Amino acid sequence: KYIFLIVDQIVRCKALLVDQDEKDELSLFCLRAGRKAAVCSDFKNSLYYFTFGISLLSEQNWRDQFYLTLDLHNAAAEAACCTGDYNETDKYITEVLSHARLLKDKIHAYSTKIYSLGARKRLQEAMQTGLSVLGELGETFPSKATKANILLNIIKTKLLLNGKTDNDLAEVSDMLDPDKIAAMSILNLICPIAWFLRHDMFPLLSCRMVQLSLQHGMTAVSSFGLVTFGLVMNGLQRYEDAERCMNLGLTILDRYKVQEWLPRVHVVVYGLHAHLTKPLKICNEHLSHAIEGGLETGDFEFATIGSQITFCRFIFTGKPLQEMKRFISDRADFVASYKQEQVLVYTKISLQLVYNLLGLSRDPTVLTGEAMNEERTFSELRTKKHESALASMNVYKLYLCFLMNRYEVASTMAEKTRLWTKRGHLFLFSQQCFYDGLSSLANAQEQQREWSQRRKRRKHLSNAKKAIKFMKKLARLCPATYLHKVFLLEAEFAAAKGNLDDAIPLYQCSASMADHEGFLHEKALACERAGLTVRHFGDSLRSTTFLSQALEAYSEWGACAKVVQMRTRFPELCSSTASTEETIIS
């Protein structure tokens, strides 16, 4: 209870300590105090206690007090990593790896090394380190995963799961083999890295965690393995299987009641899956708790990943842009302070998108401004082969180009990200599918009277049909989030076919539902597209009504760039909202 007071008093008397046994005893007290401080998320003080404890050890500490020295160095490396001091982290890790002889004594240091490398965007090195350690533990993986290998592992894992009821799985005995426990720990660390870097390896790593759990017993890490396998099932659009894995993961998490695993499990469940079956408001509440849990337990990786998912959801759910700007700016400072460079890339992309919508960039469709430079960022991401961030940038550009009525450019962006629609469990890429379909339909509508463009038009309509089919599948799972999007796609399809009488009620349904569910920006979009469509068919009076409604909604959202564009293009429109100039200045 009084460990901090005791250690602080003894530290004051350090000069009086002569006997090495007394120093060793104080080192042990420092280890306990540091661990307690870490539990309270006071990582700076915990690092102080650990380093002070190390300073009390003898010159022959690795020989005379091996396990005390090992524990202090491992704890110091982990605390330094949590404070973002990676030079200190590397120093303590090197000490452990150079003095520990057995692999079991190196696992903790390897784990901290992998985590710190990932945080510094040294993903290739982190991945290779993890795979190398797994090989030493008897868990080998191919250098390059083939489709056949991936499919065989998925089938094997599904057979293991299908052979047991949910109750049977929840009661599987605990994992006891120390090598398998260590392997699960390493798999847990490199699986998120594979998500960003090696998409071919992600299913294999996820499958292996589930296989080890079912064949050798459960551990707290098994909860993460189950939910990541749920992501694999989502990618195959096996949503019922995915839901089962997610629920099993939550059950195992509850069984072990280990708080440190809650952030990553809940970020996967409520950040990457639950939007398919639950309203976003419920998902965001759980995601917010996961982020808070990550900050409390030191899991800054998943706290920042959860924050990035939140940014994406805010952007595509019509949250007021000025509020978004403040929120993302604050979180960007937090991500930078903990040197989570991997996630900082996504944060800057999201922030620049908001700046563009607010009219704070020279060209609203180019992600260059206060937060980032598009050309430079594209170049850096290509060099580092950061496919996930590249895809995110292209999806954001697709959105901006469509919003600013640059439909040909939007279709080009859509083609660059179309492969990612197969990972439809990601909220961002469900949006990709939506705006991909809208871009195709807008182009098809503009090519309606051009005989020379008939081949392109057929291609656009074919792509739109695929988008509608996919979005209908999502709408059946969660109508609150996706049904109004389906109505807008169907309205655009009817308009592209020349059926204005069918299109208008669908536009109105889309706008009404979007407004009811809180998607203000998509209410504006439905009204705008309705206005442009009826104007295309020659009804300028009704067009002005729809476009005025769109302008009002865009103004309420705070999309100054769009408001300026509409007022310039359609000077006859009148808005009851505050002037754009005042909004921009604020």
Image: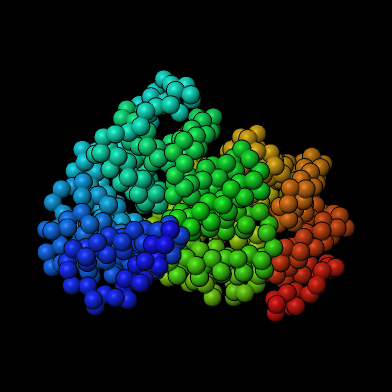
Which residue appears at 60% of the width and 61% of the height? 400
Q: Which sits in the foreground, 240 or 523? A: 240
Side of 463 relative to 233 (left or right): right
Q: Which sits in the foreground, 344 or 429? A: 344
Which residue appears at 31% of the width and 71% of the height? 10
Q: Residue furthest top?
A: 163
Q: Position of residue 43 (x, y in %)?
A: 40, 65
Q: How many marks?
A: 0
Side of 373 relative to 405 (left or right): left
Q: Position of residue 263 (x, y in %)?
A: 48, 50
Side of 335 relative to 566 (left or right): left
**Quarter of the image holding residue 357?**
bottom right
Which residue appears at 63% of the width and 64% of the height? 324
Q: Position of residue 93 (x, y in %)?
A: 24, 61
Q: Can residue 465 be seen in this snapshot?
A: no
Q: Which sits in the foreground, 318 or 176? A: 176
* Up-down relation of residue 417 to residue 551 (above or below): above
Quadrant location of the N terminus? Answer: bottom left
Q: Position of residue 197 (x, y in %)?
A: 36, 52
Which residue appears at 36% of the width and 58% of the height? 35
Q: Can residue 25 be seen in this snapshot?
A: yes
**Color encoding of the figure:** rainbow
Side of 457 relative to 41 (left or right): right
**Quarter of the image holding residue 112?**
bottom left
Quadrant location of the C terminus? Answer: bottom right
Q: Which sits in the foreground, 186 or 82? A: 82
